[in-house]
Image: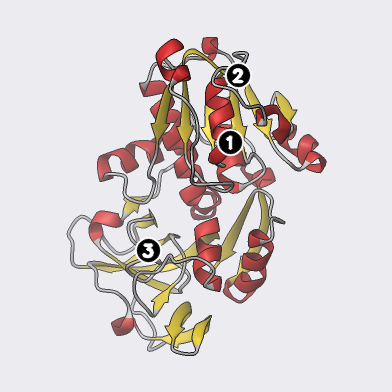
Amino acid sequence: MSPPDSFTAFRIHQEPEGHRSGLESMQVDALSPGQVLIRAQWSSVNYKDALAGTGKGRILRRFPLVGGIDVAGTVVASTDPAWHEGDAVLATGCGLSETRDGGYSQYVRLESSAVIAQPAGLTAREAMVLGTAGFTAALALLRLLDNRLTPGHGPLAVTGASGGVGSLAVDIFSRAGFSVHAVSGKPEQAAWLRSIGASEVIGRDALGETGALQSARFGGGLDNAGGPMLASLLAQTVPYGSVVSAGLAASPALDMTVMPFILRGVSLLGVSSANAPRPLREQVWERLGSDWKPAHLERICTAEVELGGLPAVFEKMLGGGSQGRTVVRID
């Protein structure tokens, strides 16, 4: 299958007069170099995509670039013998929409090291409902389990639970046998959070206390907020519990004492989804296509748009109005 002379992509520019982004006609030769050319079928919208697409965050390291940090599609050409025409593949992070053209394009050219075989248990659309958000949530679970956390430690708190990473974490953690307490500032979404696996839904004020140590109530959890909420979660974690930090929606700062670490043996773990080594990415995606596949993907996927609908989605997301995951239909 040969690519057409031109195709459509959502491209981002930074020019002397300011930021500009939108749909453009492109040719394959204009794409970032790589060994694998794919016909994209689906992508997704992450907070990082909204920042990049609107120019409200310094995400791109060079211009112009095609946006979109996630993509799933089919190989149409490859100079690497590991990949063949017709292979179903996906890619997340790995410099997409940061140092190289991303997934908001009918054709995407990738370095072969970034390409992951689409798990047999996932369709291309399901893979993008997951995308970077689901990969991050599953990577967090792997870190918790590797640190010997068990359901016996107690419930896991998930902050920012109504967002992409948070909602997928609620589902994935509950499927893995943990009781999940969804922390959200949107009480109107409580029923939806319970429907995707939360055993309890609690307000942000539950993590609004201050103090070096507080009553231990959580086995640990996943924090997408940073700042005081992360400090409070650590102070409310049981002895030898674990907390993963995955975001900074509230603040990149962390002002706290070492008391949870030296008096309770609490662990603070990090995840970096964009540059996870390939063997780890393959391991996580294998689990996402099998025993960790969320049971409620269609409930978590709350919107579907085409490339032309991206600007409106970006503005809604940055305004705090998004819920769950939005997939982008490209093919």
Up-down: is 17 above or below 33?
below
| Residue type at numbered disc 2 | Pro
Mark toward the viewer: 3 or 1: 1
The answer to whether residue 111 of the structure is visible from this angle is yes
Mark toward the viewer: 2 or 3: 2
Number of numbered discs visible in the structure rendering: 3
Image disc number at residue 96: 3
For the N terminus, the quadrant is: bottom left
Position of residue 27 measured from the top left corner of the image (x, y, whole percent)? 36, 85
CA gap between label 3 and label 1 equals 31 Å
Can you identify the residue that label 2 sits on? 155
In the displayed orientation, state which residue is furthest to the right.
188
Q: Give whichever of discs 2 and 1 has the lower sequence position.
A: 2
- 213 sits to left or right of 39: right
- Secondary structure under tag 2 reads loop
Position of residue 320 measured from the top left corner of the image (x, y, whole percent)? 69, 55
Coloring basis for residues: secondary structure
The answer to whether residue 331 of the structure is visible from this angle is no
